[in-house]
Amino acid sequence: MKIKHTEIETEQLTKVLHNQKVIDQTDAYFEGGRVYGIQGDSGSGKTVFLSMLCGLVRPTSGSIQINQKLLGTDIMQPDSVGIMIGRPVFLKEYTGFQNLQLLAAVRREISNTHIRKMMDFVKLGSNERRRYGAYTPQMAQRLGIAAAFMEQPDILLLDGATSELDPGGVDMLMDLIRRARERDALIIISDRNEGFLRELSDEIYYLSEGSLSAGA
Ligand SMILES: Nc1ncnc2c1ncn2[C@@H]1O[C@H](COP(=O)(O)OP(=O)(O)OP(=O)(O)O)[C@@H](O)[C@H]1O
């Protein structure tokens, strides 16, 4: 049984891009069992912030600790993380199922049966033989969601995860996020769909001029 309680803490986190402080000396604390919504104008730095939390972008200065381990020094990425940032990237010649199998082969924690169940859950089960290259944008988004959630990660970072989804798809994603919260996952979402963000978030933060502030 998992006893670990997941925590992410940033201290004086700063990212400079093109002489602009996109993130500016930001202190933040996130913990498992909660959903955090990040709002902010286009270009305010939401993607950069989430990309730093999973080790995809290195901070200019300051630190990120995940379960007391320093990201970039003790660990290069979180041990257990599901990420949806930007468009999903998969191999075009492989089917969705084969793409998920490839990802699952890294950790070897889940079986083909589990992957098949996940494909069914995101409503791609009936398209098992279709190559990813022939997927519609909505199918691609659903496969990205399956990839992010299938190993039941401790941390979920979801940036624009509702884009391309129809209302049924948004409901499915909300269901997955709620289940993840129930098993104590730490979830941070940034999304243009404000209703989705407000409905799910335990806490909302606004990112403006490089700083996070608590929202209403
Ligand atoms: N790889 C990069 N190189 C240089 N500048 C970048 C890079 N990525 C982002 N930026 C800049 O950093 C700033 C923040 O971008 P970011 O994509 O994080 O904003 P955002 O809040 O996610 O926007 P949106 O809501 O439109 O997705 C922008 O000014 C952007 O131009």
Image (tube, rainbow, N blue to C red):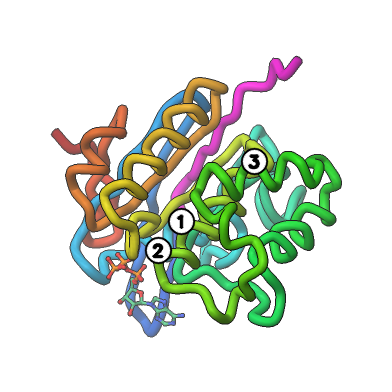
Q: Quadrant of the N terminus?
A: top right
Upstream in sequence: badge 3 or badge 2 = 2
56 sits left or right of 20 in the view: right
Whether pointer 3 and pointer 2 mark residues with C-beta atoms closer than 8 Å, the reply is no
Q: Answer with the quadrant where ligand 1 appears in the image.
A: bottom left
- The amino acid pointed to by label 2 is Thr
Mark 2–mark 1 distance (CA, rounded to whole Å): 5 Å
Q: Which residue is mark 1?
A: 50
Q: Is mark 2 within 8 Å of ligand 1?
A: yes
155 vs 12, nearest the viewer: 155
Q: Position of residue 199 (x, y in %)?
A: 23, 34
Q: Quadrant of the C terminus?
A: top left
Q: Which residue is mark 2?
A: 47
Instruction: Identify the magenta region.
Output: 1-13
Is residue 62 visible in the rendered image? The answer is no
Residue 17 falls in which quadrant of the image? bottom left
- The amino acid pointed to by label 1 is Leu
Mark 1–mark 3 distance (CA, rounded to whole Å): 28 Å
Marker count (numbered): 3
Residue 202 falls in which quadrant of the image? top left
Whether pointer 2 and pointer 1 mark residues with C-beta atoms closer than 8 Å, the reply is yes
